[in-house]
Amino acid sequence: MSQTSPYDKGFHISWDQVHRDSKALAWRLDHQGPGAGGEWRAVVAITRGGLVPAAIVARELNIRVIDTISVKSYDHKNQIEAQVLKAPDATLVRDGDGILVIDDLVDTGRTLEVVRARYPRAHFATVYAKPKGRPLVDTFITEVSQDTWIYFPWDMAMQYVEPLRGAS
Ligand SMILES: O=P(O)(O)OC[C@H]1O[C@H](OP(=O)(O)OP(=O)(O)O)[C@H](O)[C@@H]1O
Ligand SMILES: Nc1nc2[nH]cnc2c(=O)[nH]1
Ligand SMILES: [Mg+2]
């Protein structure tokens, strides 16, 4: 476990915000596929973080075929060797042509590197991107600085916060 964290800042994202940003991603990807009329054949979500944006994008673009690839790259905030724990249906995904691979974010790009190596012709889309990972992603919505840790609503709970002037 590393003792120092490269993440100085926190960016807290609400359900509402991730819904809006995922819809913006869907609008950007609409009619951009290689099929007739720019259709995509299927969505592949990178679990677990990609599941929520993938559901929203698939709903907006009326894509009914959805598969998953399970990649574990972090143990809490510590990067570990990326492991593929489960692959999508090979007959569906083939070399990735017409497949939209979706993740919540790209940070160092290690996760996308592993998935890209398997499906070189797929289109890679994330909602958030940090500078190091940008070259690995084809489409994203919001750039976040490299020293920021993004907190998603599924990892958080509402809690009491002290007033600015302290408790009285
Ligand atoms: O660009 P990278 O440096 O590889 O980091 C990005 C990946 O890290 C997180 O997943 P994580 O491995 O923590 O698993 P999770 O999606 O199950 O939370 C995130 O959801 C991305 O998939
Ligand atoms: N939740 C979360 N997972 C990550 N995995 C790699 N970077 C991040 C990040 O900024 N936030
Ligand atoms: Mg992930």
Image (tube, rainbow, N blue to C red):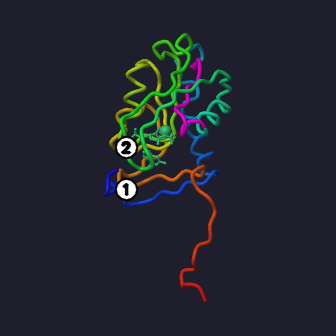
Q: Position of residue 33 (x, y in %)?
A: 53, 21
* SS under mark 2: strand
Residue linked to disc 2: 79
> Which of the two labelled residues, at mark 2 and mark 1, occupies the earlier sequence position?
1
Q: Is mark 2 within 8 Å of ligand 1?
A: yes
Residue 63 shown left or right of residue 149 in the figure: right
Q: Which residues are magenta?
A: 38-51
Count of numbered circles on the image: 2
Using the rendered view, name the quadrant where residue 79 is placed: top left
| Amino acid at circle 1 | Tyr
Could you tell me which residue is drawn at 45 percent across and 27 percent down? 84
Residue linked to disc 1: 7
Q: Is mark 1 within 8 Å of ligand 2?
A: yes
Could you tell me which residue is drawn at 43 percent across and 26 percent down? 115
* Residue situated in front as seen by the camera: 122 or 115: 115
Q: Position of residue 29 (x, y in %)?
A: 55, 30
Residue at the limit of the structure toward the front, as seen here: 1
